[in-house]
Image: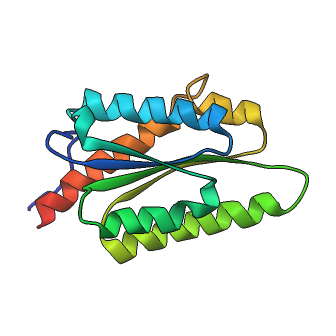
Amino acid sequence: MEKLEGKLNATGMKFAIVASRFNSLVTRQLIAGAEDCLTRHGAADADITLVWIPGSFEMPLVAKRLGESGRFDAVICLGAVIRGQTPHFEYVAAEVAKGIAQASLSTGVPIAFGVLTTDNIEQALDRAGMKVGNKGADAAAVAIEMADLLKLMD
């Protein structure tokens, strides 16, 4: 039986990080976690491109464009959508998730979902490195493993 499994080896790979400026207190911590994970697993600083965007809603378009560019082995989307007192949260969170999945499928490039969807700022900060690990690092690990797996499948 043949077994294919991606490894956490980012050596020689190129990554784009798409980060939302909205809720940047949280997003900056997610970026730090992602960058640490990438470099810890062999990515060179010169092989990481950070793209700032206004908010999470804009992520799918930018992630798709980066995936189509042929420049990156994987794209990592980082942001925080925090519930408020209106239905805005549900619309944004759902569209971002659907759009990122569609971008990955249409480009064939792994696009990791590191967009927090939380009820409050405390939950977001906890998931950005305070108490529950760093979901930016988790998304970077997914991007590395998926990029490596797809190379094995070629």
| Residue at the farthest left position | 1
| Residue at the farthest right position | 85
**Disc count in the image?**
0
Q: Position of residue 95 (x, y in %)?
A: 63, 68
Screen quadrant of the N terminus: bottom left
Screen quadrant of the C terminus: bottom left
Left/right of residue 139 with respect to residue 20 in the rendered view:
left
* Residue 107: quadrant of the picture: bottom left
Left/right of residue 13 with respect to residue 103 in the rendered view:
left
Colour setup of the view = rainbow
Depicted 51 relative to depicted 25: above or below: below
- At x 85%, y 49%, the residue is 84
Q: Position of residue 104 (x, y in %)?
A: 39, 68
- At x 19%, y 47%, the residue is 13
Q: Where is residue 26 in the image (x, y as percent from the top left)?
A: 63, 34
Left/right of residue 148 with respect to residue 128 in the rendered view:
left
Q: Position of residue 108 (x, y in %)?
A: 30, 71
- At x 51%, y 66%, the residue is 60
* Residue 36: quadrant of the picture: top left
- At x 46%, y 73%, the residue is 102
Comparing 18 with 139, the one in front is: 18
| Residue at the farthest top position | 130
Left/right of residue 123 with respect to residue 3 in the rendered view:
right
